[in-house]
Amino acid sequence: MAGSSETDWVSRFADEVIAEAERRAPGKVIVCASGLSPSGPIHLGNLREVMTPHLVADEIRRRGYECVHIISWDDYDRFRKVPAGIDPAWAEHIGKPLTSVPAPAYSVYANWAEHFKAPMIYALEAMGIEFHAISQTWKYTSGAYREQILLAMRERHKIDAILDRYRTKDKSPALKQTPVDEAEAAAVEGSGAASEDDGTAAAGYFPYKPYCTACERDLTTVTSYDDETTELAYTCVCGFSEVVRLSEHNRGKLVWKVDWPMRWNYEGVVFEPSGVDHSSPGSSFVVGGQIVREVFGGEQPIGPMYAFVGISGMAKMSSSKGGVPTPADALEIMEAPLLRWLYARRKPNQSFKIAFDQEIQRLYDEWDALERKVADGTALPADVAAHSRAIGTASGPLTTTPRPVPYRTLASVVDVSAGDGEQTLRILRDLDPADPIDSLDEVKPRLDRAAHWITTQVPADQRTRVRDEPDAELLGSLGDAERESLRLLLDGLDDHWSLDLLTTLVYSVPKLQAGLAADAKPTPELKAAQRAFFALLYRLLVGRDTGPRLPTLLLAVGADQVRKLLGA
C-alpha cells in the first residue's frame, strides 16, 4: 500500500504516525494502542477502539516499518454494577478488581475479566488482528508501575492544579453525540472509567487509590501520605484501616485521569484513538494531554475521535447475554472480511450501523459488487484500499469463500431446505447447471454464516415452509387469466431450470399474457401484474403473499413439487 497516502483515511493517518514517530524517537518501534475493559460483553462499538489503530498499524507494517499494536486490558478496573441476567448476589463484589470477581455461574473461566476477554480474543484472532496484550492487573500487582505511581504521588499538587482548571467547566455540547439506539448507548457507557472519581478527598488530593486488604474493594479513602517514607494511610467503609509503604504496596491503582497519561508515557504510545466521551473539555483525553507533559515528561498520542457504531435488528438477537451484540456474535452471521470492511470504509468520525436484520443481505450485495469492481479495475482508489484492508493484513490473506454465491440466495436455500445438507447441495447445484457446485465446501464459510443468520435472527413466523399438498380451495377459485399464467410458467419450467433462466421466466409470464415481448420494458401496469402473479405463486407454494426470491424458491421446491403445488 506504499504510495497510496491520498486514497483513504488509513493511509493518511499512517503518514502522520510515521512522521510523528520519527520526530519523537527515530528508528524505534512505532506503538499504536487500544484499551478495552472486560467489565461485561465487549461489543461492536468497542471494536472501533481496536480496528482504528489496527488498520493504521497494519498499514505501517505493510510499508516495512516495525510497529506494534498494544491492547491494554483494563482488568484492574473496579467492578461497577451487576449486569442484567446475573445473580444479584454478585453485588457483594462491587468495588473489587475485575480479576478478583468470580465469573458468572455458568462460566468455565477463572474470573469475571477472563470470561469477557475470551470471546473478544477469539474474534480478534478470527479477524486477523495481531496485537500485544497487556493485563493491567499484572502490571499493577507486579510493581511494574511503582516508579510512575511514586512520581504521581510526589506531583499530586501539580496534578490537582491541572484537574482544577476543568472542574468547574461545562463540557462542550459540540463534542457530545447523542446515541440513537441501545447499541450506541452501551458504547457511550463503555467501561465507566471516564466517570471515575479523580482522587479528591477531605484530607487532600491523592491520585492513587488502594484496594482494601481486608475486603478487596476500592471503597477506600487515603487519609495521609508521606513523600519521604512513602507511607500511605487509608480507611475503608468496611471498617478496616492500615498504613502501607507505597514503595512496596501493589494492591491499588492510579485514578483513571492519571493512569491513562502515565501509560502513554510508559509505553511510548504514538497513536491511540478516543471515543466522544473522552474528548470534551475536562475529560480523560484532554486532561491527560496536560498531565503526560507536565507530570510524566511525555507526549500525548495523536489520534482521532471516533463515532458510535450502532446495530440494526438487534431486537431479534437470540443471545442470552443480556446486552449489545459482540464481535463474536457478528462473526457468526458474517465473514471476517465483511466485518473488517464495515470499519475500514468509514472514517473514524463517521457513525454507521452493523446489520443483524434483513439489511445484512444488502450489505453482502454491496460487498460482492465491490469485489467485482476491484476484479475488473473499475473500483475507486479509496474503495480498492478498503477492500484490500478487509481481505487481508500485512501477514497475509484471511479465509474467504471460494464460490461467493449471494448471501440472500444462500439464506433462502437454507431457509427452504431447513438446513438439510443434501437438499441444500441439490438446490445449489441447480443454480448454474453449466458450472455446478459439487460440494458445500465451495460455498463455505459464507453458507454457515447465512445458516446461522436464518436460524437465530429470523423469527419463526417469518421462516419459509413449503406446502406439502396443493391448496385445492385456492386452485379451484382461480380465474382463466390466473390459470393461464400458471400454465405458461409450467410449460417453460424444464427449459429454464437455472437461477438466471427462472428469473427471466417468472418476470416474462405477465408480459406474454399482456401480448408483449419477453424483453419488454416494465410499465406501471406490467409491474402491478407481476406483483399479482408473484403473490399467487407464493400463496400456492408457501401459503403467504411473500417469501424468498421466486427463482430460488422454485429451485428449492424442485420441479416435480412445483408442478404438484401449482395444480399441473
Image (cartoon, grey):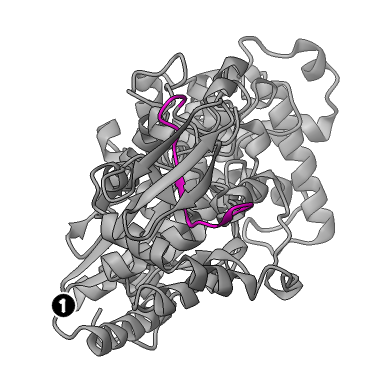
Residue 465 or residue 486, whichever sits in front: 465
- Residue 388: tell me if it is visible: no
Q: Position of residue 148 (x, y in %)?
A: 32, 62
- Residue visible at 73% across and 70% down in the picture: 168
- Quadrant for the N terminus in the image: bottom left
Instruction: List x then y, in percent, for residue 535.
Output: 75, 35
- The answer to whether 83 appears left or right of 438 in the picture is right
348 or 111: nearer the viewer: 111
Q: Is residue 201 left or right of residue 246?
A: right
- Part of the protein shown in magenta: 201-215
User: Which residue is more in the foreground, 505 or 303?
Assistant: 303
Q: Quadrant of the C terminus?
A: top right
Q: Position of residue 97 (x, y in %)?
A: 43, 35
Task: Where is residue 330? Give x, y as percent.
Answer: 47, 41
Q: Amino acid at mark 1?
A: Lys
Residue 186: quarter of image: top right
Q: Is residue 9 magenta?
A: no
Image side of residue 422 versus residue 92, left or right: left
Which residue has dot 1 on it? Answer: 28
Residue at 50% x, 56% y is: 206
Q: Residues within 10 Å of mark 1 (few under 14, many from 20)?
A: few
Q: Say which element carries label 1.
A: loop
Q: Is residue 143 above or below residue 99?
A: below
Tell me the residue at 18%/59% (across/down).
396
